[in-house]
Structures are given as structure tokens and as C-alpha cells.
């Protein structure tokens, strides 16, 4: 019987040690999980690093990998970020071919998405945009009508919040 995969986002606090990222990533890989994106950032405690990991799994295998990850000695805690009460953001840098004729139209799209022109040359623009993964996907899809030269995305970072209070 087919078990559907669900995309999960977990926040993993790990000790700030050499090769800690390699240990966690290889832990997922050895168990057959493909990581869709991973971000690593410092926390207010210099001894801890936050890894935000996005991966797909069945409900049963997700619980299993979380339990196994919690047992790693470099891991302080693992927390599944609930989509209803967490904020997610991603950064996009997109380089698009843009001569003088296309610039105004591209700038108008960038403004609608609340992005900014990070760099401008005679024949191209680099656009910077932050937002939810869905917003980023929508912007990239819309920009495909132009000649996109390069796309660079950071991957998701997230934090638990009480959305109702925002």
C-alpha cells in the first residue's frame, strides 16, 4: 500500500562543533532520507547552532528519524515546526537578462513582490526577494517569461511563533 510523503520542517539545535553539520546530514542520508533544504545559523548561545531541515517522509518514518536524531550526542533538541504556528522565510537572488526595454516591466513585478534590485548592469539585473517558499516559487514562475540567467535560493529558515498574536 502506498503511503503518501509529507514535507516536514524540523529545527535541530546542535552543539557548535567541527563536522556537526556533516554528522547530522549523513545521519539522514544513511537512513534513506533526502534533504530538500538545510540552513545553519548561530543562536543567542554561542555553543549552539540551529539547523532547519526540510525533508519528505511518511508519518511513521518521520517520527523514526526524529527519534533517532534526538539520540545523537551532538543534538540538544529536535522540534517539528508546525505550519499553522510557525513563520518560514527564504532568500532568493535571481539574475535576469534585462535590457532598457524590459527594465520597467521587471521593476514593476519586483515592486509587487516587495523585492529589490540588488544590482544593475547594462544587460542584466539581480533581484533580491525574501518571503515564504510559495511566494518565492510564484515569483520565479512569473520571471520565467523573461530570460533568467541564474537562480540562487537559501532554503527555508523558520521559527515557531503564535501567528494569532501577529
Image (tube, grey):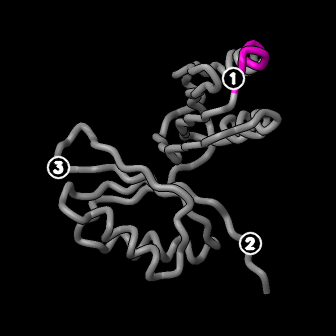
Give the numbered dot on residue 4. 2
Left or right, 148 with respect to 12, comes to right
Give coordinates of residue 124: x percent, y percent: 63, 26
Q: Which comes sooner in the sequence, label 2 or label 3?
A: 2
Label 2 Cα crowd, 10 Å radius (few <14 / some 14-19 / many 20+): few
Q: Which comes sooner in the sequence, label 3 or label 1?
A: 3
In this rendering, the answer to whether 105 lies above or below 80 is above
Left or right, 30 with respect to 4, comes to left
Q: Residue at x 48, y 43 (%)?
A: 157
Q: Quadrant of residue 105?
A: top right
Whether residue 81 is visible here, answered yes or no, is yes
Give coordinates of residue 52: x percent, y percent: 44, 52
Q: CA distance from mark 2 to mark 3?
A: 37 Å
Q: Residue furthest right?
A: 145
Q: Residue at x 45, y 73 (%)?
A: 28
Q: Residue at x 64, y 73 (%)?
A: 58
**Residue for badge 3:** 47
Image quarter hosting the N terminus: bottom right
Q: CA distance from mark 2 to mark 1?
A: 33 Å
Q: Which comes sooner in the sequence, label 2 or label 1?
A: 2
**Circle 3 SS class:** loop
Q: Nearer the viewer, mark 3 or mark 1?
A: 1
Q: Which residues are magenta?
A: 98-104
Question: Viewer-proximal residue, 147 or 157?
Answer: 147
Q: Quadrant of residue 108?
A: top right
Q: CA distance from mark 3 to mark 1?
A: 37 Å
Amino acid at each position: 500500500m502506498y503511503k503518501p510523503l509529507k514535507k516536514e520542517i524540523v529545527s535541530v539545535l546542535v552543539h557548535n562543533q567541527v563536522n556537526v553539520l556533516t554528522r547530522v546530514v549523513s545521519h539522514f542520508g544513511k537512513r534513506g532520507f533526502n534533504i530538500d533544504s538545510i540552513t545553519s545559523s548561530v543562536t543567542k548561545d554561542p555553543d549552539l547552532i540551529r539547523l532547519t531541515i526540510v525533508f519528505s517522509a511518511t508519518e511513521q518514518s518521520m517520527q523514526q528519524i526524529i527519534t533517532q536524531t534526538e539520540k545523537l550526542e551532538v543534538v540538544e533538541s529536535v522540534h517539528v515546526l508546525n505550519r499553522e504556528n510557525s513563520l518560514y522565510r527564504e532568500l532568493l537572488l535571481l539574475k535576469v537578462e534585462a535590457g532598457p526595454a524590459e527594465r520597467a516591466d521587471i521593476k514593476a513585478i519586483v515592486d509587487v513582490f516587495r523585492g529589490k534590485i540588488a544590482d544593475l548592469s547594462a544587460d542584466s539585473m539581480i533581484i533580491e526577494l525574501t518571503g515564504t517558499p510559495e511566494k518565492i516559487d510564484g515569483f520565479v514562475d512569473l520571471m520565467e517569461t523573461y530570460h533568467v540567467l541564474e537562480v540562487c535560493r537559501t532554503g527555508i529558515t523558520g521559527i515557531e511563533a503564535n501567528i494569532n498574536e501577529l
